[in-house]
Image: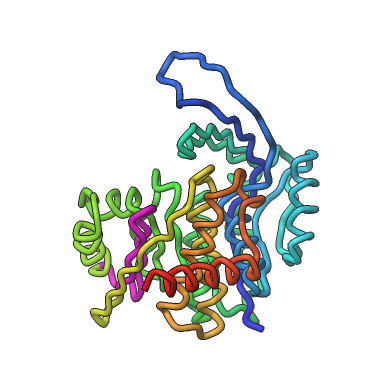
Amino acid sequence: MARILVVGSMNMDIVTKVERHPIPGETIQGNETRFFIGGKGANQAVAASRSGASVAMAGGLGTDSFGVDIRRGLGEDRIDLDYVAEKPCMTGIALITVDGAGENNIILSSGANGIYGADEIDKLDLSGFDVILLQNEISSETNQRLLDKAAEKRIPVFMNPAPIAGFDQSQLGKVTFLILNEVEAEALSGIRIEGSSQALEAGQILLHDGIPHLIITLGSKGSIYMDQSGKQITFPSFSVDAVDTTAAGDTFIGAFAAKYVTGTGLRDCLRYATAASALAVSKPGAQSSIPTEDQVQSFLTMENNRTIRLL
């Protein structure tokens, strides 16, 4: 079985539902607050594992009760935690508000994620891994050390440059697969994206950095794949009622990677990942919303049957 190493953040997400997001200086009433295991790294690891991949997680957790809860939760998803370092500080926290339309605002407190460093990367044994997933919720220096080490070992890296603030664009030279949303693509390319045509233009600019493969996700407008050979695939989204978009991008990336490492064709990888992210936005929370492989396949079967009935 192909193995994936996810290096990145693990957080406890504190999620409050609101009718609308507050404006600066305003206090509003929250409708409900719940705790979910999250963090972009952990979310992607869970998505990949639930999609059938063998997954290991590397990163930092604090010594508090949140760290204990996260270890237990990731273990229940059969994720190898041997590379997770315990740090003498708080576990990372994400404060999230979700409005009536399912859109979210997020404030991150990095905690142990922020002090997971290059020394830990130097201790990682990358042999036996087929793909590495990387994000931007740990330090830029730590990411750079991992990119260098992966390049030496010739292990492909799937990079999600989120959150985009502070991302070091020079790191793109060692990324095999860049997967990002329209906001991140705008920030890196300088092109305002309002649809697929602008996304294609932004993608061409990013490919000039030498990235072999690129996917830009466009929410309800689907996604676009591009590569250095000139190949382009535009894939539509599935129509679902959005409840919470918190882990949609992470679900897409983890699900896509899990299928890609098995040799599944690009279009089928995109279809599977798009379905997984659609299911994720239809439920609240981060990891609690990420579907299993059986759930995604059932959804795709229903979509196929619906398409046949319409023909």
Q: In the figure, is residue 21 to the left or right of 48?
A: left
Q: Is residue 259 magenta?
A: no
- Residue 123 at least partly seen: no
Q: Residue at x 39, y 69 (%)?
A: 310
Q: Position of residue 90 (x, y in %)?
A: 70, 37
Q: Position of residue 144 (x, y in %)?
A: 47, 61
Task: Identify the magenta region.
Answer: 209-226
- Residue 200 at least partly seen: yes
Scheme of image coloration: rainbow
Give the quadrant of the N terminus: bottom right
121 and 37: which one is in front?
Answer: 37
Q: Residue at x 23, y 49 (%)?
A: 194
Determine whether 223 is above or below 62 in the image: below
Q: Position of residue 159 (x, y in %)?
A: 45, 63
Give the quadrant of the C terminus: bottom left
Total number of numbered discs in the rendering = 0
Q: Residue at x 60, y 54 (%)?
A: 117
Q: In the figure, is residue 122 to the left or right of 89?
A: left
Determine whether 243 is above or below 2 in the image: above
Q: Position of residue 240 (x, y in %)?
A: 47, 52
